[in-house]
Amino acid sequence: MDLHQVSVSIPLLLLLLASCHQHADALPETLSNAVVTEMRAQIRAAIDLDLDENDSGFILMPGLVRLIFHDCVGEGCDGCVNMEMDDNAGLGTYINTTEDLYQSGAVDGTPFTELLSRADFWILAGIEAIDYSTERAQRPCNRGCDIVYTGLVFQTGRQDCELSPYDDAEPEYPSSFANTEEVMDFFDETFGFSKKETVAILGAHTLGSAHRSASGHAGPWVRNAREFDNQYYIDMLDSENLWAMNGIGNRNTKYQWSANINPNGTNIMMLDSDMCLIKDLGTIDQDNGEVTGCTYSTCPDAEEDVLDWVKEFAVDNELFLVEFGKACQKMISNGYDSLNDLTD
């Protein structure tokens, strides 16, 4: 849906293929909270190192959140993505970094690879990225108030596909040129989401940026794209952002909604599949995403039971975090009737 295809070196690929046949029944049925806490500390250290040293634009923290979405679309969360699909362009960076940690990490001498599946590890890394970015958004609370989290719970029991972390499955991903009905239908059919859950899960776009080299789109959805909160909804509703259609690139142009208020810096943007949460966009050119026939100020409102949730989340960050957590929990359980709780 968004986001530089990165090639995998032959030695790394051979290592992955050699390890991909690990049987699920060779792993512990569940893990203790203490073991997972240590894993999360090592994941957070990797995120911190990336935040300090990464100048590529493909930042690990939001990338981990994108990775779990792309993994869980289709038959379920199985530690696999098809890097031949354009929709997955850019994920190679995050898979490589996560794979390095999965292969090298250990708790009390036991390698991560002997403690949990790659699919479970990706989910754990995604949860840690969400929790850490939530803390960053509420940093004043580190000095006297309680941080509100999403409530995401990590469970084990997901199984890797045969060739994890890669496969040749071709699941359908949502188009960046989708209208309200198409977005709602995708998330309903893929995850069984209600309209509220769909509006909530799209708040993940608060993190990270789109990249021209990957998706054809460019820019962050919000100005502080390393903090997880309800800013996505606030900005979308703010007419003072002077939202307008903007073509990206001179060749193979793709259109997006750009906020035209900061001529000396990077402007925030929204995709059609974002803006359709509040606007009935009418005719969308499916070759390039250009909306014709109306503007931000003249497009009719989106259907009430979608728009109302955007408005609710825009004024209540705690409500957004809680509802996002519920929707995301459902997404990361896709493909499984039951998963295993951690032990004390």
Image (cartoon, rainbow, N blue to C red):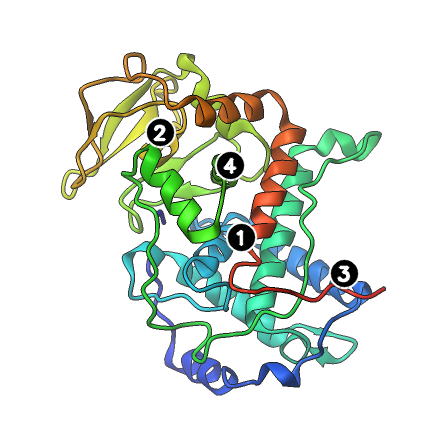
On screen, residue 86 versus residue 13, left or right, reads: left
Question: Mark 1 or mark 4: which comes first in sequence?
Answer: 4
Is residue 271 visible to us here?
no
Tag in front: 4 or 2: 2
Amino acid carrying mark 2 in the image: Cys
What residue is pinned by disc 4? 203
What residue is pinned by disc 3? 37
Question: Residue 47 versus residue 201: which sits nearer the camera?
Answer: 201
Is residue 308 visible to us here?
yes
The kind of secondary structure element at disc 1 is helix
The kind of secondary structure element at disc 3 is helix
Mark 4 Cα shell of 10 Å, populated few (<14), some (14-19), many (≥20): many
Question: Mark 3 or mark 4: which comes first in sequence?
Answer: 3
Can you give x and y, in whole percent of width and height, for residue 125 in the image? 60, 58
Tag in front: 3 or 4: 4
Amino acid carrying mark 1 in the image: Met
The kind of secondary structure element at disc 4 is helix
Tag in front: 1 or 3: 1
* Residue name at image x 33 percent, y 56 percent: 172
Can you give x and y, in whole percent of width and height, for residue 38 in the image? 76, 64
For the residues labelled 1 and 3, say whether their Cβ atoms are less than 8 Å apart. Answer: no
- Give the mark count: 4
What residue is pinned by disc 1? 331
Q: CA distance from mark 3 to mark 4?
A: 26 Å
The kind of secondary structure element at disc 2 is loop
Can you give x and y, in whole percent of width and height, for residue 106 in the image? 70, 74
What residue is pinned by disc 2? 276
Amino acid carrying mark 4 in the image: Gly
Question: Mark 4 or mark 2: which comes first in sequence?
Answer: 4
Q: CA distance from mark 1 to mark 2?
A: 21 Å
Question: Residue 15 versus residue 121: which sits nearer the camera?
Answer: 121
